[in-house]
Image (tube, coloured by chain):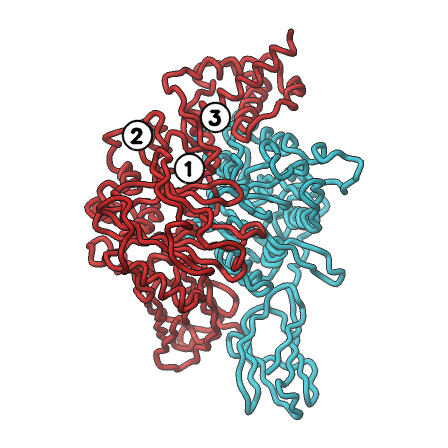
């Protein structure tokens, strides 16, 4: 007889089990038939029928598992999460770093800053993973630039350290900077220096596609009022939240979220990660309260401005890209709904759709930045010409165009236009302004900016219309 | 459930430029078999489209390898045209894709077509999730089920193809159950399976094992999506000690969960299946225990999750075996020694324990 067939009277009494974990650890309680029986974040209590259970703990992207036996007649039980080892660019004790790295990160963070400006401090600390040691100095290929591309410093030249780690505490003018890394091509991401805070940027040199490179995807960014302290649990929570955000999740207890909202803990990056991941309608009230706190803490931060677009349209054109890709998606969506615009010729107006995946950060290849185009130039006629061409030729008559070398963006737009033309042709849908594509509808379809679509259409028109004119003549 | 369901199943092994896979075609065929099974999806044969790669032939130029994107697009366009004319195509749409793939981010997963190559991905991939979501939002189906057993490596500089259909919001939008072999940026894994050690996608193996009796089911043989997810996660975790970002990922509403497998009272959809055959037994396993110190005259006890003792199948002074006909958690107790809780799940029939 299975347990489900027992009458209520004969069913053994359930046992109270207390699960103990930190506020960013999720716990899953799985029964003997591999069905999920309970889950929770941080410490929680579950009432479980006697039996065998598998307990899974998840912190960031790291997992630990254990099995427990809940015996009939047991007094309340206690199950504590183990220390969950996770990989991180931050030199925490649990992430397999050496004492030398820990000490150097702390010493540089608490030492004198090298001045490149005034008002904001940023710690840059890079270490080599064991598999990338000895290849090159850890900070080789890392440079910081202003938004218009002027070099602020070369980290290898400015940093102090050893063969396995190097760091620099830089004093900068408050604002946003481009962190550039040579990673089989040049990649860039934004770092924001904020007045009265020490922004701490941790990077890892590790094997990327089997070659030792600075891996910007795993960059960790923390903010603190104090020098770096590897035992600071808030930094550890922020790092777990960043890792969870990479997986599109937000995991923290309501108590911790409320502490962030009430500004009881000084961890704005933890707040940013949480706000970026709280996307469901259920989270709206807490998201808005958290945003209110972040607006007070970091009023000019580009990611806070991006999150604010949910509440009100942008007061001014956006001229600084955010740090997080989620923030960039919010900005992109707002520009397509005319709740925001991108400053013509600014860096955000040049961010390509070909940004790096597999990371919470907005990272783009420097050589893929869109040209600073004339915003007033009308692309609609080129788009109309392309659609006319596809309408006239039909999908089977574009084989001569297959050899035209197109960029990924151009090719994606061309395929899209071709399929629409083919469908409309087959379904005998007349071409009208309502069902013709335009720059905005294309940008919405591809989830990118109008500027990106305009660049693709411009390129496509030059190549395709040019090729057809040549072949027609 | 079943008679008004539709399915598109694609499996690609032959990739002249990217390197061949071994199990994607077998996975697609096996999923199709479950779809057609009167105890499984119970989908009419006429509503199932199966698209497979043919064995690689060196004479075929890589860029001409098939299937190509146009063949997959045509299957979806057909559903689109039907829906545009009638407003509804069917009850449930099953989408299954196995092969190489990529993901730009957590929201995207695409199957690479046979003619794809590194640096030549545009127009040679099919983004499963955006299409599944389009058919859901248009309410052309009440439910859309998407399974993608594809690698989801990050081809960072690739634009995902966009769905070219006009936006259409149906009321209510279809419910969803999406399952992906891995989260983004990790390669899906194939494993050797069965007596012939045939290569199979681990995700599909776990999925079908759960649907065919492994996962917790109700009295009518139906499996809730929540239990299917839990089964697949535990199965894969048992086979491979993966980090969370390498584990399968599911996306569905826990409050409006979908059910899988035909209700046992439902008539078969396919002709020729005059009577519903009895449900097959789920996977069974052999637990094999021996002493860590090689000691003799051992005494063991194996109990199931409800603490019922399982009778041993064989026993000697140094080794014991039990056959268990249900996957699950079991406790092995060595009299005078220790205990160990065992996870009896996965593709390997024999579970070896040293205690």
Mark drawn on residue B172: 1
Write down the colour of chain A: red
In contact (CB < 8 Å): disc 3 and disc 1: no
Q: Is residue A342 visible?
A: yes
Residue bearing mark 2:
A340
Quadrant including the C terminus of chain B: bottom right
Viewer-proximal residue among B306 and A127: A127
Image position, residue B327 (x, y; %): 59, 68
Distance, label 3 to label 2, CA atoms, is 25 Å
Residue shown at the point (65%, 41%) measured from the top left: B10
Residue bearing mark 3:
B166
Q: Is residue A386 left or right of residue A239?
A: right
Image position, residue B4 (x, y; %): 58, 39
Q: Which residue ends up furthest to the top in the rendered image?
A: A473
Helix, strand or loop for disc 3: loop
Image position, residue A466 (x, y; %): 58, 14
């Amino acid at each position: 007889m299975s347990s489900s067939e027992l009458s209520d009277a004969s069913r053994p009494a359930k046992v109270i089990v207390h699960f103990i974990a930190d506020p960013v650890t999720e716990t899953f309680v799985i029964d003997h038939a591999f069905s999920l029986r309970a889950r929770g974040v941080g410490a929680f209590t579950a009432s479980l029928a006697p039996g065998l259970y598998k307990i899974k703990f998840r912190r960031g992207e790291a997992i630990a598992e254990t099995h427990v036996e809940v015996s009939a007649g047991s007094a309340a039980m206690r199950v504590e999460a183990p220390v969950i080892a996770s990989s991180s660019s931050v030199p925490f004790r649990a992430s397999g770093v050496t004492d030398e790295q820990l000490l150097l990160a702390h010493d540089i963070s608490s030492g004198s800053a090298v001045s490149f400006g005034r008002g904001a401090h940023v710690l840059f600390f890079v270490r080599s993973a064991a598999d990338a040691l000895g290849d090159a100095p850890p900070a080789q290929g890392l440079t910081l630039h202003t938004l218009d591309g002027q070099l602020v410093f070369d980290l290898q030249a400015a940093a102090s350290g050893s063969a396995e780690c190097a760091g620099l505490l830089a004093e900068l003018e408050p604002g946003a900077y481009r962190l550039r890394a040579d990673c089989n091509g040049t990649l860039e991401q934004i770092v924001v220096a904020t007045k009265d805070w020490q922004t701490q940027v941790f990077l890892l040199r590790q094997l990327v596609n089997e070659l030792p490179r600075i891996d910007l995807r795993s960059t960790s960014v923390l903010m603190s009022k104090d020098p770096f302290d590897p035992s600071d649990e808030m930094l550890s929570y922020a790092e777990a939240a960043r890792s969870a955000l990479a997986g599109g999740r937000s995991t923290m207890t309501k108590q911790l979220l409320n502490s962030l909202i009430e500004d009881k803990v000084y961890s704005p990056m933890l707040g940013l990660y949480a706000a970026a991941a709280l996307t469901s309608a259920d989270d709206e009230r807490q998201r808005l309260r958290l945003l209110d706190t972040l607006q007070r803490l970091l009023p000019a931060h580009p990611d806070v401005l991006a999150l604010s677009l949910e509440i009100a349209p942008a007061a001014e054109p956006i001229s600084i890209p955010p740090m997080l890709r989620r923030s960039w998606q919010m900005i992109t969506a707002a520009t397509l709904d005319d709740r925001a615009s991108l400053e013509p010729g600014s860096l955000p107006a040049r961010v390509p759709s070909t940004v790096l995946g597999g990371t919470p950060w907005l990272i783009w290849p420097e050589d893929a930045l869109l040209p600073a185009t004339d915003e007033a130039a009308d692309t609609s006629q080129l788009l109309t010409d392309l659609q006319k061409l596809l309408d006239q030729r039909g999908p089977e008559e574009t084989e001569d165009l297959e050899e035209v070398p197109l960029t990924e963006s151009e090719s994606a737009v061309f395929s899209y236009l071709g399929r629409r033309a083919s469908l409309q042709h087959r379904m005998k849908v007349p071409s009208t302004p309502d069902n013709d594509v335009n720059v905005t509808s294309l940008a919405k379809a591809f989830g990118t900016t109008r500027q990106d679509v305009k660049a693709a259409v411009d390129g496509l028109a030059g190549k395709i219309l040019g090729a057809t004119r040549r072949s027609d003549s | 459930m079943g008679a008004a369901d539709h399915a598109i199943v694609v499996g690609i092994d032959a990739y002249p430029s990217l390197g061949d896979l071994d199990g994607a075609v077998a996975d697609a065929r096996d999923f199709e078999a479950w779809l057609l099974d009167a105890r499984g999806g119970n989908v009419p044969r006429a509503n199932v489209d199966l698209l497979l790669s043919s064995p690689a032939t060196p004479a075929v130029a890589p860029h001409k390898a098939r299937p190509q994107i146009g063949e997959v697009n045509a299957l979806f366009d057909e559903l689109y045209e039907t829906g545009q004319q009638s407003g509804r195509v069917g009850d449930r749409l099953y989408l299954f894709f196995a092969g190489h793939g990529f993901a730009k981010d957590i929201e995207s997963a695409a199957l690479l077509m046979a003619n794809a190559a590194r640096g030549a991905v545009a127009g040679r991939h099919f983004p499963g999730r955006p299409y599944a979501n389009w058919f859901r939002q248009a309410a052309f189906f009440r439910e859309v089920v998407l399974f993608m057993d594809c690698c989801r490596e990050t081809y960072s500089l690739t634009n995902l193809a966009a769905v070219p259909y006009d936006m259409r919001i149906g009321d209510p939008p279809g419910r969803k159950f999406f399952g992906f072999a891995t989260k983004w940026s990790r390669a899906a894994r194939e494993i050797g399976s069965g007596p012939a050690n045939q290569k199979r996608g681990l995700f599909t193996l776990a999925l079908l094992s759960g649907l065919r009796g492994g996962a917790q089911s109700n009295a009518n043989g139906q499996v809730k999506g929540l239990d299917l997810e839990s089964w697949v996660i535990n199965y894969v975790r048992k086979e491979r000690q993966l980090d969370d970002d390498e584990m399968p990922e599911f996306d569905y509403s826990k409050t409006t969960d979908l059910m899988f497998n035909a209700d046992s009272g439902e008539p078969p959809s396919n002709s020729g299946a005059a009577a519903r055959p009895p449900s097959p037994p789920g996977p069974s396993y052999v637990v094999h225990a021996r002493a860590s110190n090689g000691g003799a005259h051992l005494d063991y006890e194996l109990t199931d999750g409800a603490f019922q003792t399982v009778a041993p199948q064989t026993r000697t002074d140094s080794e014991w075996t039990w056959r268990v006909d249900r996957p699950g958690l079991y406790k092995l107790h060595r009299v005078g020694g220790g205990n160990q809780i065992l996870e009896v799940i996965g593709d390997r029939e024999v579970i070896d324990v040293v205690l």
